[in-house]
Structures are given as C-alpha cells and as structure tokens.
Image: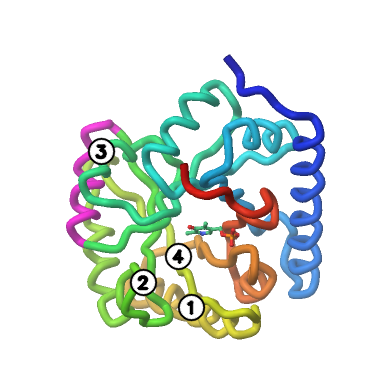
Amino acid sequence: MKPATNIARARELAQRLAEVRGRMALACARCGRAADSVRLVAVSKFHPASDILALAAAGQREFGESYVQEALAKQDALVGQDILWHFVGGLQTKKARAVAGRFVLVHSLDSEKLARELARRAADAGVLQPVLLEVNIGQEEQKSGVDETELTEFAELVLSLHEDGLGLDLQGLMCLPPDFDAPEAARPFFAHLRELRDGLESSLGVRLPQLSMGMTGDFEAAIEEGATIIRVGTSIFGPRPPKA
Ligand SMILES: *Cc1c(COP(=O)(O)O)cnc(C)c1O
C-alpha cells in the first residue's frame, strides 16, 4: 500500500522544495557554476514516508537518511518509486551489512574497521559501494569523522578496498562543520574541505569529484565553496518531529 498523502502537506513540501531549488540556482549563478553541478539530497530523517512520496511527486529524487532501521523501513514502504537513497548518518560497523548495496552513496565512512567491514559486505552483496570519507573538519572532540592528519592514510586504505569490481568506490569527502549561527562562520571549513580534497587528488593521483557539504543553515556558502552535494532537511520538511 502506498503511504497516504495529505494534499495540504504535499503542497507545502512542493513549495519549500521549489524555494530551496531557487536558492541553489541563485548561489550557483553568484559563483558562475552550472545549476546542475550541485545535487540536492533531501534529508528525511524522522519524517514519514508520505512526505518523501509527496516530494518525489514534485520531482525530488535523492533522499538522505541517518538511521539504518528507519531508512530500510522507508525503502520498503516506497519500493518501486524512482528514489535514490543516501546514507548520511553515523554508521556502526555491525550495521554495515544492512547498508551495503542499498544506498547510492554512504557519506560517513570514518574508520578503518568500518571501511573493511563495508567493503567485505559490499563484495558479499556483489556490489561496488560508492562512499565518501567524513572529515572532522572542526577538529571537535565530540564529532565523528577522521582527523585531517590521518586522511591521506585512510584514503589510501579505502582506495585499496576493492577487488574484481567489488568493494568500495571512493568518490570524495563529506563534513559537518561546527555549529554556528552564521553561514559565514562555516565557509572557511567548506573551503578547507575542498583544499583537502584537492590535496588528496594530487598526492594520490585519483579523482575525488564529490564534496558533500552544506545543510539548511549554510548550503549557499557551501555551494560557493564547491559543494557538489548539499544535504538539506529543515528547509524542505520544516522542523523535525522528535525521534519515534
Ligand atoms: C540531519 C542532517 C542533515 C540535515 O540538517 P538540516 O539542518 O535539517 O538541513 C544534514 N546532514 C546530516 C549528516 C544530518 O544528520
């Protein structure tokens, strides 16, 4: 059964989506980037499958989830829809098996143990799993992500974790900068993630095209600093209900 959609809610979501898309286009225009050079991932955590369905009907195709069980339940509820799922939250090693092959991109690879397990599970599932490395860009104690001093070594490891076209496919970097009220405070962190990416590309001789950075409070600054994927929840869905 398809999740029921409330018409007023569907209209509200379509309108918010159009606003975000408009702001993305303006940000791209300001810095001379093509409007289609940035992908919008609508972060739907805690919001019902009916909201995702309404946004899909309004043309949104990529959705991000942060919790494995919640994400898989929504995938099941929306099976057959033209939706690309991203995993953007922290991932426990023991959940790697549930995730491998079920998301077009895992944004949050941040440890050797997780990388090895996800590679193994992807190979078991017969897939090459696209991943990003999460960098602890503000060097904050409580945040996940690898320290930039360990980034080159970690990237080398991840690049080695595939065989016969199965395992991990490293596509770039992701970050969550420290929380600030002003997007201008986040901007230097976005610029720095881009520098780290550029550095890896030249030192390792690989292409890492994706930079996943920018959320509701700061996505325009992220676009101006080179984001290729922004992850936006609140601006599209409104405030998140408490976790069920
Ligand atoms: C929840 C979440 C987002 C979306 O945050 P908003 O501020 O609501 O846009 C983006 N990225 C990650 C990793 C998240 O967990």
| Residue visible at 21% across and 33% down in the picture | 124
Q: Which amino acid does label 1 sit on?
A: Pro
Please say if the residues under marks 4 and 3 sit with CB atoms less than 8 Å apart.
no
Q: Give the label on residue 9, or none.
A: none
Please say if the residues under marks 2 and 3 sit with CB atoms less than 8 Å apart.
no
The quarter holding residue 59 reads top right
Q: Distance between the residues labelled 1 and 4?
A: 13 Å
The quarter holding residue 125 reads top left
Answer with mark 2 or mark 3, whichever residue precedes in sequence: 3
Q: Give the label on residue 143, or none.
A: 2
- Mark 4 sits near ligand 1, with its Cβ under 8 Å away: yes
- Mark 2 sits near ligand 1, with its Cβ under 8 Å away: no
Q: Which residue is the site of mark 3?
A: 97
| Residue visible at 76% across and 37% down in the picture | 9
Q: Give the label on residue 174, or none.
A: 4
Answer with mark 2 or mark 1, whichever residue precedes in sequence: 2
Q: Give the label on residue 178, or none.
A: 1
Q: What element carries label 4?
A: strand
Please say if the residues under marks 4 and 2 sit with CB atoms less than 8 Å apart.
no
| Residue visible at 64% across and 54% down in the picture | 239
Q: Distance between the residues labelled 2 and 3?
A: 24 Å
Q: How far apart are marks 2 and 1 (CA)?
A: 9 Å
Write the start and end of the magenta stretch as one range. Answer: 112-126
Q: Which amino acid does label 3 sit on?
A: Arg
Residue 39 in view: no
How crowded pointer 1 is (Cα within 10 Å; few <14, some 14-19, many 20+) is rated as some
